Amino acid sequence: MPLRQGCKDRGGHEGRPGDTRDGRQEDAQLTGDGETHTRVTGNGETRTRVTDDGDDATNRPGIPRPNPRPSPLTGHIQRQLQRIRAADRRRPAIWDGLLTTFWILFAVLDVSSGGWRTVAVDPGVPPRLVLLLSAAFSAPLLWRRGHPMAVLLFMTPFALVNIWTGAVIQAAFLQEIVVFNIALRLPLRTLALSGGIVLTPLAIGSAHFPEHWNQLFVPHLYAFVFASLFGIVFRTRKEYTEALVDRANRLELERDQQAQLAAVAERTRIAREMHDIIGHNLSVITGLADGGAYAAAKSPERAAQALDAIGTTSRQALTELRRLLGVLRDPPDNADRTPQPTLDDMDTLLTGVRTAGLPVRLSRRGTPPAVPPTAGRQLTVYRVVQEALTNTLKHGGGDSALAAEVTLTYRPNELEAVITDNGTPAPRAAAPDGTGQGITGMRERASLYDGTVETGRPTGTGWRVRLRLPLEDSPS
């Protein structure tokens, strides 16, 4: 019978009976052991599964997820292999030296114990010759990375002597290490050529000892094939990894370039909108103001009309500007509605700096203008003082005698802010975490209002930041 009419899925979405979130049809029936769920997929396929009584099928995974973590033994082996590869990449010469030394010691032990005679075709070969052949196969491994083909050619005469004399020492298999390096680093045609170089002495030895051809030729043939395959596999994996890294780097570069292009396009769009809104309306306002001033003496009625038009145009420009800024502003929930700080908030700023442990004194000189500086200029002065005092706190190095002074000087057409401290110059010059962005930001803020920022040491000790900011815009 039908079950769960108008049920809700795990996300809380209510749907029709039998509907799943992805549009597939599912019907459920009660059985003796639980529920039988029949699902019809998008391509018409029918799937049925049974759940235990009381279990919700939507809350039970149909297929268990594989465990991504390897077993302890496999993980240990992987970690050890990674350490070996890392050591091989960091110090290949040391690794090759250890490998060569191991095989030389193994050859000495093999010759001294006489173990080589168990596989030799002719046990009567002089031990000195066997030792010489072992060294000839072992020592050249030092150069197997940079010159694998030359090393293999060097081993070839000794391989021929090894087969022709019947010594058949096991050190001859060290040629396959060189073959592995050829397969790993050189073209496939060079690998094929190395196969001829390795197998030719073996074929000659098999012709010289035909009754032992399977002992002389077949093991080396298998070893060559396996060494070649291993080299090709490692080479393919290395090239694939390098291709992935290169692709990731290119994608990151393209993403950064796209972000820069998008930022440039956005700045261009904003500049165009600002020009269209402010430039046009200000031009209209300027023309109306000039016309109204001219008409005021002769036609007060025309002057009133001009003033009315100026008000209308100004309100229109303000509305459009607010609309543009609303697009650029953060969402309403994240918008910061705190007023921007002004020169009246300077005492609050210095109180916070004193609380942080830096004694600072504020001095005001001159007479403030009747019309206060614009909000943007006051914000610029505030931010420059804030950044300068922050740098003093950052680079003070815990000096208990460190102190600072802020001097605001009002001149007829200029406001000057000087921030000085008595800190030592060494910590400032060697700031490990400084990037110079603070000074750059101060200069950028000042340049918006044709101001300048000068920084340096006035008397060899301490640090001084001087901001000079015009109170009026220069005529353009």
Image (cartoon, rainbow, N blue to C red):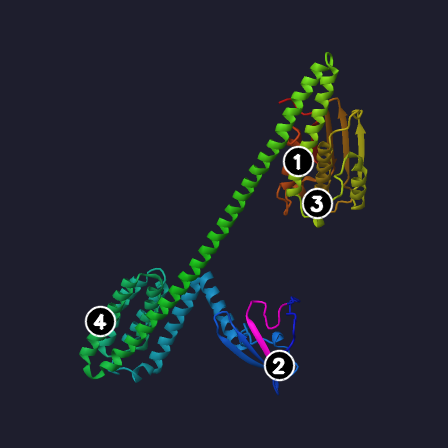
**Residue 126 visible from this viewpoint:** no
Task: Kindly state the secondary structure of the residue where label 1 is placed.
Answer: helix
| Nearest to N terminus: mark 2 or mark 1 | 2
Residue occupying the far front of the picture: 1
Please indicate whether residue 123 sits to the left or right of residue 254 in the image: left
Q: Which residues are magenta?
A: 15-29
* Dot label at residue 1: 2
| Nearest to N terminus: mark 1 or mark 4 | 4
| Nearest to N terminus: mark 3 or mark 4 | 4
Give the spatial CA distance, label 3 vs label 4.
Answer: 75 Å
**Are dots 3 and 4 in contact, CB under 8 Å?**
no
Q: Is residue 224 above or below residue 343?
A: below
Q: Of tags 1 and 4, which is closer to the observer?
A: 1
Q: Residues within 10 Å of mark 1 (few under 14, many from 20)?
A: some
Q: Which residue is mark 4?
A: 200
Please indicate whether residue 41 sits to the left or right of residue 383 in the image: left
Hey, what amino acid is under mark 3? Lys
- Of residues 293 and 18, the one nearer the viewer is 18
Q: Of tags 2 and 1, which is closer to the observer?
A: 2
Q: Which residue is mark 3?
A: 394
Give the spatial CA distance, label 3 vs label 2.
Answer: 75 Å
| Nearest to N terminus: mark 4 or mark 2 | 2
Q: Of tags 4 and 2, which is closer to the observer?
A: 2
**Are dots 3 and 2 in contact, CB under 8 Å?**
no
Q: Which residue is mark 1?
A: 321
Tell me the quarter of the picture where residue 288 sits: top right
Q: Tell me which residue sits at (23%, 75%) in the image.
A: 202
Q: Of tags 1 and 3, which is closer to the observer?
A: 1
Give the spatial CA distance, label 1 vs label 4.
Answer: 86 Å
| Nearest to N terminus: mark 1 or mark 3 | 1
Hey, what amino acid is under mark 4? Thr
